[in-house]
Amino acid sequence: MPQGMQEAQGTQESLSESVGRVAQGFEFSDFRARVTLDDVPEVPGMIAQPTQAYYKWLTSESLAGRGAVVEIGTFLGRSTVHLAAGLRLRRDEPVLHCFDRFVWRPEHADTVALPLQAGESFEAIFLDNVRAVYPNVRTHAGEIRDIAWSGEPIELLVLDAPKQLPDLSTVLSVFGPSLLEGGRIVLEDFLYFPAYPIACVLSRLGDVLAYEHVVDRSHTVALRVEAPLACGDAQPLDWDPSRWSPAEVRARWDAILEPLPEPARRRLAPGRWLHLHDLGAVDEACAGVRGLDLNRDEQALWERLAQTHLHDRYAPLFAALGLRRRFDPRRPKDRTRARRELRRAWRRAYLGSRRFGRRMLDAIQPGSQGS
Ligand SMILES: C[S@@+](CC[C@H](N)C(=O)[O-])C[C@H]1O[C@@H](n2cnc3c(N)ncnc32)[C@H](O)[C@@H]1O
């Protein structure tokens, strides 16, 4: 799915091997040793095991039970069932509020084959998936730009839909005032470098948010809310990464990256070069990516991204790495081949999706996929 090769399958660069460690006031861990995932059903989607384990641990063991749990960007519920599996272990059984447009798009077929036409709702499928684990779930269907919140205090806000400034600032201004001190914002794609505006925007709230958990082998980061987050409706101009000066980019990116543990820093670091490219400092950005010293997993990620729309936007950066788009998106045959190849890559990355797709189809139209 284009929005996120969210959970790279990195193996080489991990430092923490399931044992958490605390660095500079936050915890860097692969949370898989903390919980069992055997009892959580398989749902196709974007998050890999470390984040799945983190979500279950977070809601079962780390919530104080002082406020609501809110997730924005659920897709079919892979992240949600893990949040739900943790909530199920609690006594207080809080409502799990889930926001999404729940509208099927052609690119969703890259993750799982479901008999849905573009534009149809997948809310019922989502609810079936999640209610099997935890009944106390409430959906809120709609676009982020129209989103509203009751004002109920929130202890945990999980974000996997807003990736760019307009949606991020809407979410922060709508939900920010309800976030409890000591609560958390979890950002699924914080370390995914093509989504670099997330880290930039959140860095502007550095006086009220602090890194709390960095999930190893993933792009997931949790920020602890240290003080009330009253952002107001008017988004501060300096949040907008496209307005930063190149000098500001250099200084602020140092501040964003410096506290992170090495594997996490490596994931996010290319964002600085995309950012400089977007500001017109193309030569400096090209020199930056040339100096990246990519390991095998990082090289594979760049190669995959070169076959997506990102290539058109960042052609000089891909060229600096000697990568080209092998398929011409203007030729229908090439488009089909490119989609097929990408689909295979996503499926390899998100094991279980194809099996799930067959199961879903068989439930809806028995025998439709053959054996
Ligand atoms: C990356 S997927 C979420 C993946 C999910 N967390 C998982 O674990 O599989 C992003 C979701 O956000 C939703 N979304 C993206 N932009 C949105 C918007 N502007 N308004 C409402 N929903 C949106 C999409 O419908 C999609 O289901």
Image: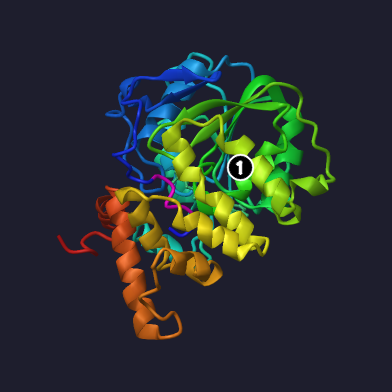
Q: Is residue 226 visible?
A: yes
Q: Colour scheme in the image?
A: rainbow
> Is residue 296 left or right of 67 when viewed as pictured?
left
Magenta stretch: dominant secondary structure: loop
Toward the viewer: 32 or 55?
A: 32
Indicate whether residue 39 is drawn in magenta.
no
**Residue placed most toward the observer, 55 or 121:** 55
Left or right: residue 23 compared with residue 363:
right
Which residue shows up at 30% across the image and 28% down it? 39
**Would you call the spot at circle 1 few (<14 residues within 10 Å), some (14-19), or many (20 or more)?**
many
- State the residue in front, 106 or 283: 283
Q: Quadrant of residue 174?
A: top right
Task: Name the spot of residue 270 as percent of width and height, x first.
Answer: 51, 50
* Ligand 1 neighbours mark 1 (CB distance < 8 Å): no
Q: Which residues are magenta?
A: 3-7
Location of the N terminus (image quadrant)? bottom left
Height in image: 117 above or below 357? below
Percent of width and height locating residue 311: 48, 68
Of 259 and 123, nearer the camera is 259
Count of residue discs:
1
Identify the residue at image location x=45%, y=44%.
267
Q: Quadrant of residue 18?
A: top left
Residue 152 visible within the image: no
Residue 301 picture quarter: bottom left
Dot 1: element: helix
Q: Is residue 68 above or below residue 295?
A: above
Q: Position of residue 371 (x, y in %)?
A: 14, 60
Tell me where residue 20 appears, x and y as whole percent.
40, 20
What's the residue type where badge 1 is placed? Ala
- Residue position marked by numbered label 1 in the rendering: 199
Residue at image coords 44%, 51%: 292
